Amino acid sequence: DAGVTQSPTHLIKTRGQQVTLRCSPKSGHDTVSWYQQALGQGPQFIFQYYEEEERQRGNFPDRFSGHQFPNYSSELNVNALLLGDSALYLCASSLPGGVAKNIQYFGAGTRLSVL
Amino acid sequence: ILNVEQSPQSLHVQEGDSTNFTCSFPSSNFYALHWYRWETAKSPEALFVMTLNGDEKKKGRISATLNTKEGYSYLYIKGSQPEDSATYLCAFSGGTSYGKLTFGQGTILTVHP
């Protein structure tokens, strides 16, 4: 059983460009959350998708958007990239329904560098 | 703004030492507290999810306690081994059953042979 998979593993972009990161959840999981981890900090919550809808959002600008597909996989899109968007982007999936009490399974992340 | 604080930021111990770290979180609106271990170049791995005041969880040589009234959790490692070297993260969830996780900045543990 594959765990949470993310692609690509590394990405280099320039300021102003747009980027799409992808996540496939663990089998049987329907809830996907995205986190940004900047250097020296803990992961910060971007948003969460459930039943193809954004269910909750953290303190991130509208440049950050997402999508969840019927097979529960998800994409994170970032427009008009800034240098400060350079970070590790983590995807986490969990069992149906409640997230707070359920274990969240993380992927290994996508390292985004903005030049 | 929720503050989840972890201490110490980093820790160096010798193989065989026992160690512990602290996670402090808001005591109001508590729903769950998660602990993760994150080894370099790997995915964060869930250790415990704790929900009840006074909860104690154990997994091998690692254990954790929870005090929701005062807003802290301790993670203990007994007889540290070099393979325990990792970043240990705690994450707080409050309010709703599908609440986001708010992470601390982590404690980096290095166990020297």
Image: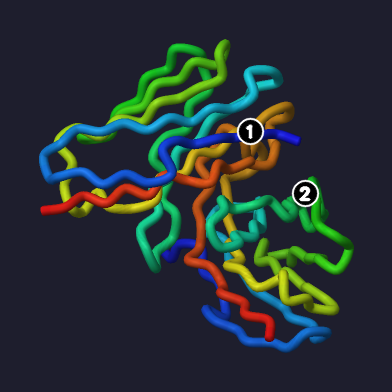
Q: Are marks 2 and 1 in contact (CB under 8 Å)?
A: no
Please name the colour scheme applied to the rendered image: rainbow
What's under tag 2, amino acid-wise? Gly
Specify whether B9 is left or right of A11. Answer: left
* Closest to the observer, A39 or B45: A39
Q: Residue at x 52, y 78 (%)?
A: A9
Q: Residue at x 47, y 32 (%)?
A: B49
Task: Specify the quadrant of the image occupied by residue B96.
Answer: top right
Does residue B5 sit above or below B110 in this rendering?
above
Q: Badge 1: how crowded within 10 Å, few (<14), some, or many (20+)?
A: many
Specify whether A81 is left or right of A2. Answer: right
Q: Which residue is mark 1?
A: B93
Task: Specify the quadrant of the image occupied by residue A67.
Answer: bottom right
Q: Residue at x 32, y 48 (%)?
A: B109
The percent position of residue A27, horizontal first and vertical second, equals: 52, 59
The percent position of residue A53, horizontal first and vertical second, equals: 82, 54
Does residue A50 sit above or below A16 in this rendering?
above
Does residue A41 sit above or below B78 in this rendering?
below
Q: Which mark is residue B40?
A: none
What's under tag 1, amino acid-wise? Ser
Q: Residue at x 46, y 44 (%)?
A: B89
Q: Which residue is mark 2?
A: A58
